[in-house]
């Protein structure tokens, strides 16, 4: 089988073979620590390869614009405040520790809110305490899948993050409690709580997690659509709908942070959506970018994303990378119109703007119509 030639736009030479970007898995200790110690920060354009340089997958601007720096939304700031209050008030307590829920629709930034706030908290702990590689202030897991016997391996998921040998499976829960105490863990993050089914599944989960909380003193943050309802049921020991025909109010003493799509932007420059877009604007690192290029497109960005932060992040990041790839170095309405997010399926019978190996859009209409260089959309599936 003939080996495919390397894309000249993505490598200076075939011999370099730069490593492709990989995510830091936040449910593994090494990935979590890396993101805590290396938060995404805008690169200095003065130290980046100059405009027109052939790109490699490790190009600092391409890698940065894959995620960009996190925008501190009101939900993030509120979560940070709630974590701080729980730590200060609940730290000395040996019983009755509260949990916390981050609830909202998919795509509204629940997981990023939880992870960002917990990472900021861990940086604060590492700043005031002596360096200790054995200290693990935060453990992050996804709801584990149902295993043999119809139960979820919660203890294995926690032990896997910590990275210590699990020991005797018959005593794994006690082993995990010992691991968490030795690691001085303060917070346990659980993502994907919407996977839990009401009834026996949720009851087993909360029974285990209550035991872990009571034995180790960790604060547990539940993240997922419907997490507030599940936490309320766990706190009260009731089904979340009704008990005895009477609807109970929520257990308000367990903090809940709700994430929602942002409403259509108002005309005011202080509008929250415009403020978030302006923050993205200031975080862009494009050679031809002018201040407020992106801010002026706030209404178009809302129309394309309907106020969902996940879609906004993908749209801005992919547009920035496309601007770099096409050597345009600026996000314009025309560039946004070529991005797939918030658009119907592309019409493959119409010309697409593509970049040749030297940079810039080709002047050959035949190449635009489908011959020659493949479009960025074609490359995305490789």
Image (cartoon, rainbow, N blue to C red):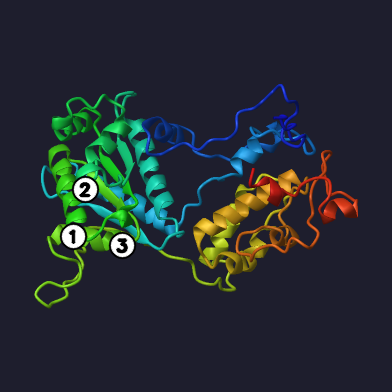
41 displayed left or right of 286? left
Closer to the eye: label 3 or 2: 2
Q: Is residue 295 above or below residue 246?
A: above
- Where residue 93 appears, as percent x and y from the top left, is 13, 44
Q: Residue at x 29, y 56 (%)?
A: 101
Q: Nearer the viewer, residue 204 or 127?
A: 204
Number of the front mark, 1 or 3: 1
When asked about the image quadrant of residue 267, the answer is bottom right
Question: Distance of mark 3 from mark 2, alpha carbons?
Answer: 22 Å
Q: Which mark is residue 360?
A: none
Labels in figure, total: 3
**Residue 226 disc label:** 3
Label 3: which secondary element: loop
Q: Earlier in the sequence, mark 3 or mark 2?
A: 2
Residue highlighted by disc 1: 199
Query: Where does the N terminus fall, quadrant-wise?
Result: top right
Q: Left or right: 373 with respect to 10? A: right
In-image side of 48 versus 160 (left or right): right
Mark 2 lies on a secondary structure that is helix
- Whether residue 287 is visible to the viewer of this picture, yes or no, is no
Real-space Cα separation, disc 1 to disc 2, in angstroms = 13 Å
Q: Which residue is mark 2?
A: 150
The quadrant of the rendering that contains the C terminus is top right
Residue visible at 26% across and 54% down?
A: 100
Residue at the extreme bottom of the image, as rendered: 245
């Amino acid at each position: 089988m003939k080996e495919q030639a390397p894309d000249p736009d993505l490598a200076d030479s075939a011999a370099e073979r730069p490593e492709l970007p990989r995510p830091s898995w936040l449910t593994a200790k090494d990935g979590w620590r890396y993101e805590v110690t290396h938060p995404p920060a805008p690169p200095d354009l003065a130290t980046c390869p100059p405009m027109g340089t052939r790109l490699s997958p490790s190009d600092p601007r391409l890698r940065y614009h894959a995620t960009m720096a996190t925008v501190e939304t009101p939900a993030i700031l509120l979560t940070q405040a709630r974590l701080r209050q729980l730590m200060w008030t609940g730290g000395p307590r040996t019983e009755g520790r509260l949990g916390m829920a981050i609830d909202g629709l998919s795509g509204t930034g629940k997981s990023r809110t939880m992870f960002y706030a917990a990472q900021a908290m861990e940086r604060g702990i590492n700043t005031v305490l002596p360096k200790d590689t054995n200290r693990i202030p935060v453990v992050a897991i996804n709801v584990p899948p149902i295993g043999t016997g119809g139960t979820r391996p919660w203890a294995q998921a926690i032990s896997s993050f910590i990275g210590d040998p699990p020991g005797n499976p018959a005593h794994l829960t006690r082993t995990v409690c010992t691991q968490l105490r030795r690691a001085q863990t303060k917070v346990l993050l659980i993502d994907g709580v919407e996977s839990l089914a009401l009834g026996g599944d949720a009851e087993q989960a909360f029974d285990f997690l209550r035991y872990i909380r009571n034995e180790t003193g960790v604060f547990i943050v539940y993240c997922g659509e419907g997490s507030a309802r599940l936490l309320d049921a766990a706190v009260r020991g009731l089904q979340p709908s009704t008990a005895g025909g009477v609807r109970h109010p929520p257990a308000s003493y367990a903090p809940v942070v709700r994430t929602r799509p942002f409403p259509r932007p108002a005309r005011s420059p202080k509008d929250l959506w415009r403020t978030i877009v302006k923050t993205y604007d200031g975080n862009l690192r494009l050679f031809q970018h002018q201040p407020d290029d992106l801010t002026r497109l706030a209404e178009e960005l809302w129309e394309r994303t309907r106020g969902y932060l996940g879609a906004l992040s993908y749209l801005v990041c992919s547009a920035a990378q496309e601007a770099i790839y096409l050597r345009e170095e600026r996000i314009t309405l025309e560039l946004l119109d070529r991005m797939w997010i918030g658009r119907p399926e592309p019409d493959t019978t119409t010309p697409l703007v593509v970049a040749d190996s030297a940079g810039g859009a080709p002047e050959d209409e035949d190449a635009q119509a489908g011959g020659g260089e493949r479009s960025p959309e074609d490359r995305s599936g490789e």
